Amino acid sequence: MPSLRKRVSTYLRQLSFHNEPRDKKNSANENAFVTKYLQGLITLREGPPIVYGKNPTDLPSYELGRYKSGASSVIGCYSGPNGGLTTVKRTEKHLSVLDDDIDFIDNHDEEEPGEGEEPSVPAADDAALPPEWSQKSDTFYGISDSLYDRNQVTRLKNGDPIADCFGLIAREDSAILAVADGVNWGEKASVAAKSAIHASLHYLNKTIFNDTKPFEKLTIKGEQSLTNDTLNPVDNGANLVGNTREVFVCLLRAFNCAHDLILENKGMLTTLTVAVILPIKSKEARRDSDGSYVCCVCNVGDTLAYVYSQKTGIRELTKGSHDVNSNRDMRDALGALGPVDGINPELSNLTLSITTLQKGDIVMVASDGLTDNFDPNVCKFTVNSNIETIKTRAKKPSANQENLRPPRETAQKVPPEPPQKPPRRSKLRATSLEPEMQQNPSVANHFIRANSVEEPRKETKKPPAPVIENKASSLRKQAARKISPPTHPGTQTGRYKFLKSKTSLDLRPGAAQNRPPILRNDEGIPYVSPIQRYELQLLLMEDILKRGISGRDSPINDARKLCETLVSFAISVTAAKRRTLEDREMYYDNRNGVMVEVSNQEKRARRKRGLERVQSLPGKLDHVTAVAYNVGNVVG
């Protein structure tokens, strides 16, 4: 069985153009995934509409069906990495207790780790999780990892600790999914992400599902603080929220709680995306009918949410938070919670989204470390195009593109001959023109046009004698005459035969040339517009989920396999960059056969040069996180 690395490299060769011969790169009939999309052979499929806005009133409101609530309805809670949200505490105070004033101005007297001191990183496993937060299954799952290279001296990965955090609370008919991506590196970025997940999940689980039991051991309780036993009692089976508009109000308040806890724990900036899946009322009162579930999403930053369906493919739920018609700067998160200006968050791209779901769909929330590694530009499958590039390439096509043009276009560049009266259909006249047609192709083309159906012919009782323009046309007409039906008086047989022969001459040489031309750079990589780049990103993800990395795997239908497959692809795409940066020459000098460690200043200089070298390699080094939930097929 081939290894994962071999399967990924094989898949990349099928998609990219770097490992193909030069003549194959520019072939119009190339059987490649990107080429098929650019020729219009592969398109995104339509699914249930996704509506987005800034306020709950901008979105349609769905009446919710009966959903299970309370502590007994929870079948799974999971968070990570390295303990996830359980590593931060939240102080629950009575409403009469005022919060202490917090100074957000940088204080130089604060304790900071030494220059050469490495931060302690807990083990990246579930051992740090309490039992109530280590419940996962194939139908609800999360994973987080680092794509950065490993330091050859400390054996720790650059960028540690992982600044991403995920959390989920799953029930049989509903779920809460959340992912936060701390901005930049460092412990404070990790604290901000964990605080955002902790506060948002706690608030939503309490206000929508009337449950705080998973957080009881994670809360520092003040006087007269609420516990799970002192929550507002509700009737069995009654919902705390009745429609999706109330759910969005809860989501916005949860984001406010997330921001407050970040400030309380002195964290820095983080993105946050939260998805809530709930059943809605159906006319047939059946959960397995179309559109029987709804997904409400709130996001700020570049952490995105998706829904994958076997019927309609993959769709982005957070599409309204970024402009798909322009190339975005991947270094800009677009928005963040935390003290952006010292105390306030940046909510410029905060977006609310809603769509209906079907049983069997998989909802996924992922950080940009995962989604950006499916970008065709990041994978080096395509390059950005602009108006000037398109105009230049259109005016000056490459030699290969000129050779692919049909002969008819080349003939049109010759000045047209003056109109001439067509010769009589006699063997003598046709034979006399044959040498001139062979010497001058324009005469032959004009002769064919002159004898087209535009010139009316008189009806005769006997079929006209065959005209021999040249050997090729004679053979084609004789073959057409053999298979044509018997002639009858009064029929225009000549017109029918000529039309059939002319059609075969026009379409047979290159039917593929009717497809739109593909503009490429000097290396043969296609140019794509921003919307093409966006659609290719979704199609690449969908292709991995349907056919696997090897292209021969069965379609993915559970949350665990979805997360593991996508993260494995991102790890494999970035493998070349890590191998380059993990070269021992970046950290040591060979002096008379002895490896001697260089100074920290020299390490930084060599790493900077190494980062410049890996810019041409595919992939993006980042922290990668994904969490997913099977709609309607949850098994604890």
Image: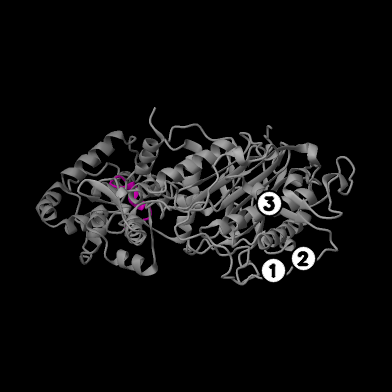
Using the numbered discs, state the Cα–Cα distance from disc 1 to disc 3 in whole angstroms.
Answer: 20 Å
Query: How many numbered markers are drawn?
Result: 3
Q: Position of residue 522 (x, y in %)?
A: 27, 58
Which residue bears the numbered disc 2? 99
Numbered mark located on residue 102 in the image: 1
Numbered mark located on residue 79 in the image: none
The residue at 54%/42% (across/down) is: 123
Q: What is the three-letter code of the residue carrying label 3? A: His
Using the numbered discs, state the Cα–Cα distance from disc 2 to disc 3 in whole angstroms.
Answer: 19 Å
| Label located before the other in sequence (2 or 3) | 2
Numbered mark located on residue 198 in the image: 3
- Looking at this view, is 196 or 564 the one in front? 196
**Residue 157 in magenta?**
no
Q: Position of residue 406 (x, y in %)?
A: 27, 53
Asked where in the image residue 187 lies, by quadrant, the reply is bottom right
Give yes or no for contact between labels 1 and 3 (Cβ–Cβ under 8 Å): no
